[in-house]
Each structure stands twice: as C-alpha cells, then as structure tokens.
Image: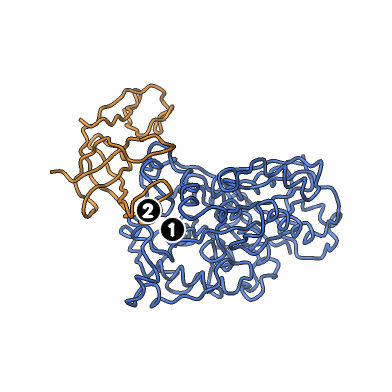
Amino acid sequence: MRQVAILGAGMIPFGRRDEDSLVDMLSYASLAAIDDAGVGDRPIDAVYVGNMAAGLFNHQSSVASALVDRINLLPAAADSVENGPASGGSALKNGILAVASGYYDLVLVAAGEKMRDVIGPVATDVVATMTHPLAEYIYGATLPSMAAMFARLYMEKYGVTPKHLAQVAIKNQENGLLNPYAHIHMKITLEGILTSPHSVVNNPIVADPLRLYDCCPVSDGAAACLLCPADMVANVAADADKPRVVVAGFGQATDTHTLQERQDPTDLKAVTLAAQQAFERAKLTPQDIDVAELHDAFTILEIAESEHAGFFDKGEGAKALEEGQTRIGGKLPINPSGGLKARGHPVGATGVAQVVELVWQLRGDAGERQVKGAEKGFSINFGGFGNNVVAFVLRRES
Amino acid sequence: MSELVAFKCQKCGHVMYPKHQRCLNCRGREFAALPVSGECTLLTFSEVRNLPWGIDERARILGVVEFAEGFRAMGWVQAAEAEVGMKLEAAQEPVRTIRGEQVRGLVLRPVS
C-alpha cells in the first residue's frame, strides 16, 4: 500500500446558501482543493462524491457525473458515495484506498449536501429515513430523538449533566466565532441557554432532555480534498515546500441498525472499533493526538465519542470538558472549527469538512483558531445513530 | 397477547426484533415466530417536540422498552408522563400514515 498525501483542501462557508445548487457548492469546494494543491490543469484520475440524499433534498441523482462535467474533469472515473451522515468519510476512505492501492494517482474527493431546499420538518424527515423503516421510522423517530434516548441513558450512567451539554455548545460556538467557514457565528452563555428564566424560551426542548442548542443546525455546504501518493507530491504540486499532510490511518466499523438491539445501548462500539483501527494503522495512540474533530451533531456525542475513541476513560469526558482540556489551548482541543454544532452539518459534507479542518490545523493555516504546533489530528464521522462510523488519523510530515 | 411477533433463533435461542436473515448472536438462519405477551418495561424515552413532516401532532413520547421475552423495541408511549422503569403494555395500532397508507406499530400504555 502506498502512503497517501492530502495535497489540497478546499471548502466553502457553510450556512444557508439559497443562491447555490448542490453541484455549484461541490464545484466551488473542488476547485478550491485543486487550486490549493497547485496541480493546475493536470488530469485527475478519479472522483468520489460524498452525498447522503440529493434525491430527496434536491430531486437530483448521479451527482458525481454532474460534478465532473461542471468542472471538466472528464473523462475521470466518478462515483457517488452514500453512507448517511458518514457519506463524506466514506467517500474519502474510498479515495484513499484508490490511491493507496496504486490504481489511481490523482483523486478528488468532494462532499456536500444542500438541505435548505426543503422546510425544516421535511429535512427532519429526510434525515430520519436512515432509521430502521419498520422498527424506528414509523413512530416518527428523528435523529434528535435517537440522540435524546441515548443521552438519557448516558447521562444517568455516567453523571453527565445538562450543564455539561451546555458547555459543549458554548465551547463550540465560541470556536465557531473564529471560523469564517462556520454557519453559526453567535456567542452563547450558560445563563442564556440554561440557568436564567429566559433560557426555556431561548433554548426550547427539541427532544427531551435535548434542547435546541444541543443540536447542530441544518446547513448547506461542501468540502473537498485532493489526494495523491506521498512520494509524488514533489512531481505534481507547484509548491512542494508546503507542509505535507498524510493519511496515517483510517478505520471504519458498523453496529446494529437500531440502537435498542445493542447489548449496551450506551456503548458506541463502532466508534471504539473505527478509532482503534485508525490508530493501529497509524501506529499511534490517542495520547499522540494534538487536535480532534468529533461528530457533535448533538452535544452528548462529543462527550461520548471523546471517551469511546480512547481520549478519556468512560465517564471522564465531561470532566475533561469542564476542566477546559478540550478548549483551544487545552490538552486536547476538540472541534476548534466549531464542530457540527457551529460549522454546521450538511450531512454528506461533514466527514470531508472535518478532514479539511485538520489539514489546515496541521499545516498551521487555521488562523485565529489554530491549535499551536499541531502535528497529528483525528476525526470521527458518525453515520446513522452510530451504526456506521469512519475515523481518520492525519499526520504532518516533518 | 399483542399482535407483535418476535423471532427466535432455532440454533441459539436469541430473540430478535425486528427480523434479520441471520442471527445477530450466532449467524443462524432458522427462526421461529414468537408471539409476544405485550408486557414490557420502559428503558429510555424522549418527548419529541420537533416531529417530522407527516406527523401532525405537537409532541409525541417515543420510548425503548424491554419485553418479558428478552428483547427490546421502540414504540409510541401514550402516557401522561413517562418514567424510566415504568411497566407498560404493548398493542399494535396505527402509528403513522406513510404515502397515504396507515402503518401499524407498537403503542405502549401504562398497565391498567
């Protein structure tokens, strides 16, 4: 297997992008990645596009074919990859394998979702189609309701409190203020969302115990990476001296479709297994990681994933958060980008957006939210409700 | 008896709901339909205030219950207030209309 470098990274600001179609957004992000890589008009061998539900959100299919035509990557091989909210991670994994295997050299991975074409309740329904059609969907199960039922169990078992959940939201929205690509640029306080009498109005219940600020926004957005074999960087990149980020390892694991069929529904086994695989491949441990982007679609998930990925013992994630260990400047900054909570979560785009943020962090290009001296990064892209999880470990080559 | 049917693996006895073509425990492929009594205990729940398109209600309590037969399932909890550990009774009733068709599922009510 060849070592794979992330030669270019590109992204567009997430948010409500009424003027842009899905393919517009994928095109802008792809061209940004190609330009960042400095490969000019050099032919690209293959394209993988991560997207969850263009058919339902935008009445469009075959998005990869549309993208290669729009930005003239013809006649590159092109595939759309769908894996729910982990579509981006899965597309990237496929691109990495294609380069690592030696079959293709230059591979573009783009990922995007345009969710704001539909009204809120329809978006909620589209996202809910990933639940089990007979055992969950028919009841009106939504992803917030799945996270809420998980949160009730997790909070009881590990002593996580509503204050801890609010602290995740406050930290990530603070980080989002420093990220020009984030959907949400708004500072929030504990008084405003939890402790004052107004908090019940500011922060209404979505699915108890989860409130509005425990949930990520519904966003439009796209992100892209250009991959090549690490030993070819000097031949294809205009600026071969730019810090080089390589994929040290990835992992992917699945779990039962429904939450309730798991022996212990508080155990996110697929997160643990995907992270372990990624660390083993990278020959690194959680202690080696300088910065992590975790899939905080709901605040409880940042805490639970930080434990399941091996950064903290079970029940210690909330404590680490409280102590400020996961802030920028802390021992292990988590979601310096603002995470899904503030950057936004255009479902199919997220897995690639997380990796784009890590590339910027590892190169020292993350501006005001830069984690000083970061050399190794980690991400979790959480599909379904934890039934299909992709993890990446990235490393800056010295 | 409720109308709910679970699936018992003929090789290892593991009880599953919903249906799988291979046992989640031993990968066995033969199952016997297991009628379910309907008595169950609430393990977790959420009052869902932002329901998806197609459900015309202000809020609905969804919960996961454990049945006496040893498996768990999600259902619609119809109780004034839900509490973890409460005893419920399951019945199969209409739960949602999907593409014009009424779909039946588990409705869970406090044991009377």
- Visual hue assigned to chain B: orange
Q: Amino acid at mark 1?
A: Ala
Q: Nearer the viewer, mark 2 or mark 1?
A: 2
Q: Quadrant of the C terminus of chain B?
A: top left
**Residues at marks 2 and 1 touching, judged by CB atoms closer than 8 Å:** yes
Chain ID of residue with mark 2: A
- Give the residue number, with chain letter if any, for mark 2: A150
Label 2 crowd (10 A; few <14 / some 14-19 / many >=20) = many
Q: Secondary structure at mark 2?
A: helix
Q: Residue furthest left?
A: B112
Q: Amino acid at mark 2?
A: Phe
The vertical placement of A325 against A390, above or below, is below
Q: Quadrant of residue A332?
A: bottom right
- Pointer 2 or 1: first along the chain: 2
Q: Which chain is drawn using blue?
A: A
The quarter holding residue B94 reads top left
Could you give the CA–CA distance between mark 2 and mark 1, rounded to whole angstroms? 10 Å
Where does label 1 land, which residue? Answer: A304
Quarter occupied by the N terminus of chain B: top left
Q: Residues within 10 Å of mark 1 (few under 14, many from 20)?
A: many
